[in-house]
Image (cartoon, rainbow, N blue to C red):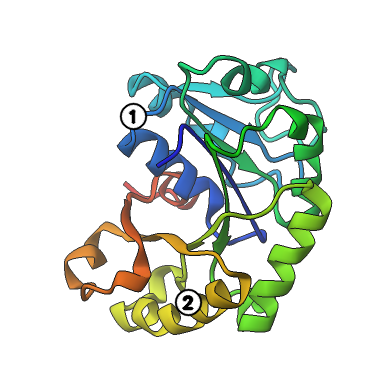
Amino acid sequence: MKRITIITGHYGSGKSEFSVNFAIQKKLNMLIDLDIVNPYFRSRELADLLDKNNIKSIASTLEHSLGSDLPYVSPLMYTPFRNDSVSAIIDLGGNDVGATLVRQFVKEVDMTETDFLSVVNIYRPDTSSVRGIVSMVRSIEGKSGLAVTGLINNSNLLEATTIETITDSIGIVQAAAEELHIPIVYTSLAEKFVPLLPEDPRCGEIISLAMHLRKKWMGKN
C-alpha cells in the first residue's frame, strides 16, 4: 500500500463505500472527498464515523454543503501531496468527468508514493466486459493526466449478491487488467462473503466492506 491512494470509476461502482472502509482499516489520516459529480452516496456523509476513527474528512469549503453538487473543494486536498507524513485516500467523482479534477494537482503527484486505482463492478452496464473496463480506464487516464496503476474488483449485485457473483467476476476483471498491463490490487466484498471466497492470487488484497453508506441511505440498522 502506498501513502496516497486515489480512486476513480463509474458512478455506482462503490468508490465511496470502499474509500470509507479502506480509510478505517488502513488507519489513514485523511479521506478527501472530491466527488463533485454525484450528490448521493458521498463519503463525506460519514464524517462523524471517520472522526471517531481519527480520520480527517476533507470536502467542500462551503458551510452546510452536505449533498451539494456545487464544484467547490477545499484547498486542504493538497495536504497529502505537500506533507509526506500524511496518509490519505482521495475519492474522485465518477468516470472521466470526475477524474478531470485531478488535473488541479497532477503536477504535485509523486507516483512513487501514490496509487491511482479504478473501481470496477462488472454488473454495471459500462464495465460489464473487458472492452468496457479498458475503455473506462483509458478515458480516465486521458482526462486525469495520470496512468491508472491498478484495479479494484468491487463486483456486486447489492442485496442479490452471492459468492458466485463475486467469483464469476474475477476472470473478466483479470483479463482487463492483463490488457491494461496493471494488477488487480484489491478485491472488496461484503464482510459475510470473505470467509467464502476461495484463495485466488488474481484477487490481490481482500478488503472487507461494512455497508456504512448503503445502510445509512436505506435506513438499515
Mark 1–mark 2 distance (CA, rounded to whole Å): 28 Å
Residue 161 rendering spot, x and y as whole percentages: 38, 75
Residue 216 rendering spot, x and y as whole percentages: 45, 44
- Mark 1 or 2: in front is 2
Q: Is residue 38 above or below residue 44?
A: below
- Which numbered disc flags the more N-terminal residue, 1 or 2? 1
Query: What is the residue that sits farthest to the front in this orientation?
Result: 112
- Callout 1: few (<14), some (14-19), or many (20+) C-alpha neighbours within 10 Å? some
Amino acid beneath label 1: Lys
Q: Secondary structure at mark 1?
A: loop
Q: Residue at x 74, y 73 (%)?
A: 135
* Label of residue 27 in the image: 1
- Callout 2: few (<14), some (14-19), or many (20+) C-alpha neighbours within 10 Å? some
Q: Is residue 27 left or right of residue 55?
A: left
> Where is residue 119, by image quadrant?
bottom right
Instruction: Return the residue at label 2.
Output: 174
Query: What is the residue that sits farthest to the left in this orientation?
Result: 195
Q: Is residue 87 above or below residue 41?
A: above
Q: Secondary structure at mark 2?
A: helix
> Where is residue 134, by image quadrant?
bottom right
Residue 133 rendering spot, x and y as whole percentages: 64, 73
Amino acid beneath label 2: Gln
| Quadrant into which the N terminus falls | top left
Q: Is residue 214 above or below residue 86?
A: below
Q: Residue at x 36, y 72 (%)?
A: 202
Nearer-the-camera pick, 196 or 89: 89
Q: Is residue 5 left or right of residue 163?
A: right
